[in-house]
């Protein structure tokens, strides 16, 4: 099958769950895949070195064929600039698919943003829609300036795309239920959990008996994470347990505010954005990993991708989350879970983890890794994805032949 994989973000941009390994697995399943994506600019909103905007650019990375289309580089809190980012890529995809539609049998469309799915729908190509975030809810929940004005139009666009999609992938049970409540046929939706962005090989931990107890957070510093609560928890720990250290790795639009808030806290350090292999080393060396999401109903049904990455590392987890993520972590046996946006509760959970016997923390990490391998692994997700793509293509072919 000639498959177009359409996604606004792709490697070398960071934290790409369905990137090169995903495409190579589709190749191995017998599909001829072309990635259609934008010029890399996430998360800073600036083009990566070695790239410049042009009408189209063809390249190959590790055997994966990539077509890059122009967009307006941006990733900040401005609804105007963010809208230009989404709309510019929407226009590029719509033009490309309209012209090249006959070259593909099916498209696999990664959402967000919904504008990518909207372009595929308007171009008339049959497509599978992979719903990672529920729009327009996400736009409203992240408090992007002016985002409330976009809720109505985005909601209408979502409903149009859902109707036109040949099949839909939901990354959580909560998202699947929400789509059904919004009128999407239950039989059209498949639940396929995400896997870790990189499944680490066995990494030996650099254990040291004389170092302080250390927790590590790795990921985005955005509105959805509300990491100011984590900084407040660090302030409590600085008074009550100065022997505990917290390390933050990553970047995002809230980074400068967080650094200002954390001034004077010697127990909290910022490590910046680091390559995937390096963050895996920091995760492996941590005594425990930290996870925080904002207190918003949307996040009750969304599972952040770092959940799978943390479980795959085999380290115990302290999480301030609600809803489906909390249930998943509790099922795994790997985490101490408290409600989000309660710094005092988070600080107490960190102390509980630090005071737990090493044997308990080791057992938590192992049960989490076992849970990941059995329920959330790359091989498990790819088997389900390939089956869905093959089944959708067969149904589309039958429908086309019957007209």
Image: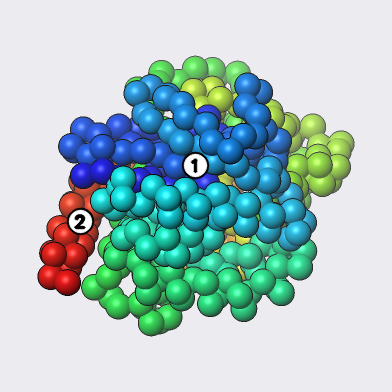
Residue 211 position, x and y percent, is: 62, 21
Quadrant occupied by the C terminus = bottom left
Q: In this rendering, does residue 56 appear at all? A: yes
Q: In this rendering, does residue 354 appear at all? A: no
Q: In the image, what residue occupies the spot 35% across and 46% down? A: 4
Task: Describe the element under mark 1 as helix, strand or loop.
Answer: strand
Where residue 369 sits, quadrant-wise, is top left
Residue 397 position, x and y percent, is: 16, 60
Q: In the image, what residue occupies the spot 18% across and 37% down? A: 30
Quadrant occupied by the N terminus = top left
Q: In the image, what residue occupies the spot 37% across and 63% down? A: 124
Residue 262 position, x and y percent, is: 81, 41
Q: Residues within 10 Å of mark 1 (few under 14, many from 20)?
A: many
Query: Which disc number belongs to residue 157?
Result: none
Q: Is residue 349 above or below residue 354?
A: below
97 vs 68, nearest the viewer: 97
- Measured in 3D between alpha carbons, the distance from the residue under mark 1 to the one under mark 2, in whole angstroms, is 22 Å
Task: Describe the element under mark 2 as helix, strand or loop.
Answer: helix
Residue at the front extreme of this rendering: 99
For this view, does 123 lie left or right of residue 114?
Answer: left
Q: Is residue 306 above or below residue 339?
A: above
Q: In the rendered structure, are the residues bearing label 1 and label 2 in contact, judged by CB atoms less than 8 Å apart?
A: no
Residue 180 position, x and y percent, is: 36, 78
79 vs 249, nearest the viewer: 79
- Color encoding of the figure: rainbow
Residue wearing tag 2: 393
Where residue 388 sits, quadrant-wise, is bottom left
234 vs 90, nearest the viewer: 90
Q: Is residue 387 above or below residue 297?
A: above
For this view, does 303 lie left or right of residue 139?
Answer: left
Residue wearing tag 1: 37
């Amino acid at each position: 099958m000639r498959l177009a994989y359409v996604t606004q973000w792709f490697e070398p941009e960071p934290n790409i769950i369905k990137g090169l390994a995903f495409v190579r697995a589709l190749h191995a399943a017998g599909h001829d895949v072309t990635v259609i994506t934008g010029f890399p600019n996430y998360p800073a909103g600036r083009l990566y070195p070695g790239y410049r905007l042009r009408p189209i650019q063809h390249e190959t990375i590790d055997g994966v064929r990539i077509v890059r289309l122009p967009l307006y580089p941006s990733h900040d809190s401005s609804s105007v600039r963010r809208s230009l980012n989404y709309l510019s890529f929407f226009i590029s995809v719509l033009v490309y698919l309209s012209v090249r539609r006959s070259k593909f049998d099916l498209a696999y469309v990664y959402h967000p943003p919904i504008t990518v799915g909207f372009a595929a729908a308007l171009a008339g190509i049959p497509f599978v829609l992979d719903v990672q975030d529920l729009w327009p809810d996400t736009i409203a929940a992240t408090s992007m300036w002016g985002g409330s004005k976009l809720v109505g139009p985005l909601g209408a666009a979502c409903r149009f795309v859902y109707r036109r999609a040949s099949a839909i992938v939901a990354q959580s049970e909560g998202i699947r239920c929400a789509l059904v409540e919004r009128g999407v046929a239950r039989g059209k939706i498949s639940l396929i959990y995400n896997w870790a962005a990189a499944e680490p090989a066995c990494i030996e931990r650099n254990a040291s008996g004389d170092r302080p107890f250390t927790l590590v957070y790795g990921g985005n510093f955005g509105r959805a994470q509300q990491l100011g609560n984590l900084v407040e928890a660090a302030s409590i720990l600085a008074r009550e347990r100065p022997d505990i250290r917290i390390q933050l790795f990553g970047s995002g639009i809230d980074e400068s505010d967080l650094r200002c808030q954390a001034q004077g806290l010697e127990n909290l350090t910022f490590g910046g954005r680091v390559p995937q292999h390096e963050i895996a080393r920091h995760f492996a060396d941590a005594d425990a990993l930290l996870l925080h999401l904002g207190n918003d109903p949307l996040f009750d049904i969304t599972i952040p991708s770092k959940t799978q990455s943390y479980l795959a590392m085999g380290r115990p987890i302290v999480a301030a989350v609600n809803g489906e993520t909390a249930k998943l972590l509790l099922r795994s046996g790997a985490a101490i879970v408290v409600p989000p946006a309660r710094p005092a509760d988070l600080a107490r959970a960190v102390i509980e983890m630090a005071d737990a016997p090493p044997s308990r923390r080791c057992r938590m990490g192992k049960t989490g890794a076992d849970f990941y391998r059995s329920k959330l692994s790359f091989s498990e997700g790819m088997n389900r994805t390939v089956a869905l793509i093959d089944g959708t293509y067969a149904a589309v072919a039958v429908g086309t032949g019957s007209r």
